[in-house]
């Protein structure tokens, strides 16, 4: 049963679909997908083309907008929009520490998780498209990991696409995870340097917090073990347009005086645990490196291994000298499965997934080279999450793709400058610029 309701200027409809867990076994187990249909109130009765939105991540459900927030208002001028919770996320059959034991032990859980990459997501989209559009191709808007999925879509089922729009999500077609992180750590260091240039007072604040965590065992109220490495991982905020300011506000009042001496305040700990916990998006941690697996090489905790090649990120060595502490970025590490209560029961599963050697290719360069689908991509200059050089190499591989390279926005440009970003991409595919 579908349920429709209204928000300011928008009519929303909850939609649910049944798809195969394993698309190579269509008579086998099924899972449920959830999507929210959105249409402008004054166009609810019109026959509009469809736009499918694929969220970034992996592991996040689609945005929960209120009315015509961000880019949605611009999209609703031309389209009926489907905001899809990709498999395992949001209201789609969830994958987390509570549900994964239904699959069996860690080996069975790891096998299950191999079906939550871009290839399966694209096949989900093709499975529901006839029901949504009556069989007509649709426009896809892919943000970040959603862009990775869009490139996989162009590789495997371009007949399902009328147009492809990508924001901050052009993946390398052949890079191993090690290549991704070797390119990432220098970018992260540049973002940290820019943060300290903006807020020089944060150099001493960050060092003081790191020193406290190196000399104290601290467990946050939700049970998260707060180590110096966990503190450094808060640098993931620096990839967003407001991230540097948010990090500064977090650091500025970290300590309070107590009878036992200075301690990290309850307010600071409350904020930190909300930023660190993967309880709301465990798939992000579980399959993040798997999205780069495309051959017989294991990912093998790539971000952790490659970090050792950049000793300036070692907090203990930094504090022994007088250098600023370096934060880290969009990286997943094995210690997260020890520190985070939401991930702790899945440590062995994550180890098995990291050791897999049977990954299959996600992209088809030969097919992309003869692409006929209109494609436009926003590439954010020095994006902390997606390497610009990798993105532009891929852009040159996809026939007909037009890029907008900009430093006006960070990786979250679709949220921060939604109407402008979407306008620009639509103008590119319509040959208006």
Image (tube, rainbow, N blue to C red):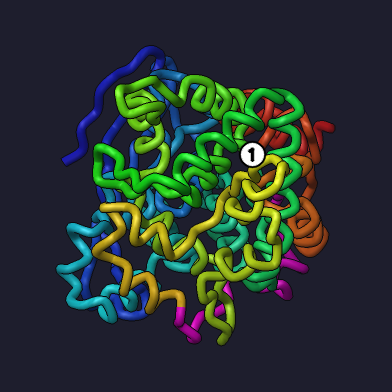
Give how far across and how far down residue 105 sits, in percent: 20, 77
At numbered mark 1, what does the secondary structure look like: helix, strand or loop?
loop
Tell me if residue 421 is in the magenta stretch.
no
Quarter residue 206 falls in: top right
The answer to whether residue 379 shows anywhere in this view is no
| Span of residues in magenta | 355-378
Q: Is residue 344 left or right of residue 130?
A: left
Residue 61, compared with residue 122, is above or below; it is above
Q: Which residue is mark 1?
A: 411
The residue that appears at 79% across and 47% down in the rendered structure is 402
Residue 268, compared with residue 220, is above or below; it is above
* Residue situated in front as seen by the camera: 252 or 143: 252
Give how far across and how far down residue 384 sits, in percent: 67, 45
Q: Is residue 6 left or right of residue 336?
A: left
Quarter of the image for the N terminus: give it: top left
The residue that appears at 50% across and 86% down in the rendered structure is 357
């Amino acid at each position: 049963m579908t349920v429709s309701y209204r928000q300011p200027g928008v009519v929303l409809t909850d939609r649910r679909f049944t798809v195969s867990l394993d698309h190579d076994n269509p008579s086998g187990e099924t899972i449920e997908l959830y999507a929210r249909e959105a249409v402008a109130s004054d166009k609810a009765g019109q026959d509009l083309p469809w736009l499918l939105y694929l969220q970034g991540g992996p592991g996040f459900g689609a945005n929960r907008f209120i009315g015509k927030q961000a880019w949605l208002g611009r999209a609703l001028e031309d389209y009926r929009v489907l905001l899809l919770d990709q498999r395992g996320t949001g209201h789609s059959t969830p994958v987390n520490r509570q549900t994964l034991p239904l699959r069996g032990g860690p080996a069975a859980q790891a096998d299950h998780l191999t079906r939550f990459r871009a290839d399966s997501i694209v096949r989900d989209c093709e499975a529901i498209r006839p029901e949504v559009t009556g069989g007509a191709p649709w426009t896809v808007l892919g943000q970040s990991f959603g862009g990775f999925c869009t490139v996989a879509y162009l590789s495997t089922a371009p007949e399902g696409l009328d147009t492809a729009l990508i924001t901050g999500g052009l993946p390398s077609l052949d890079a191993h995870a090690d290549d991704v992180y070797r390119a990432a750590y220098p970018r992260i260091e540049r973002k940290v340097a820019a943060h300290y240039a903006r807020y020089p007072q944060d150099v001493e604040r960050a060092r003081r917090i790191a020193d406290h965590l190196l000399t104290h065992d601290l467990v946050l109220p939700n049970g998260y073990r707060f180590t110096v490495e966990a503190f450094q991982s808060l640098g993931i905020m620096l990839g967003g347009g407001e991230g540097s300011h948010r990090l500064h506000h977090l650091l500025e009042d970290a300590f309070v005086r107590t009878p036992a001496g200075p301690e990290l305040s309850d307010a600071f700990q409350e904020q930190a645990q909300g930023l660190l916990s993967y309880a709301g998006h465990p798939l992000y941690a579980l399959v993040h490196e798997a999205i780069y697996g495309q051959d017989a090489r294991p990912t093998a905790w790539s971000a952790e291994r490659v970090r050792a090649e950049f000793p300036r990120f070692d907090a203990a060595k930094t504090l022994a000298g007088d250098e600023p502490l370096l934060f880290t970025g969009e990286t997943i590490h094995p210690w997260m499965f020890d520190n985070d209560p939401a991930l702790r029961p899945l440590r062995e599963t994550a180890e098995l997934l990291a050791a897999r050697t049977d990954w299959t290719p996600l992209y088809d360069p030969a097919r992309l080279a003869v692409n006929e689908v209109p494609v436009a991509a926003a590439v954010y200059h020095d994006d902390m999450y997606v390497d610009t050089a990798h993105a532009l190499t891929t852009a040159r591989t996809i026939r007909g793709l037009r890029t907008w390279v900009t430093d006006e926005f960070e990786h979250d440009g679709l949220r921060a400058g939604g109407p402008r970003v979407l306008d620009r991409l639509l103008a590119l595919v319509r040959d208006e610029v």
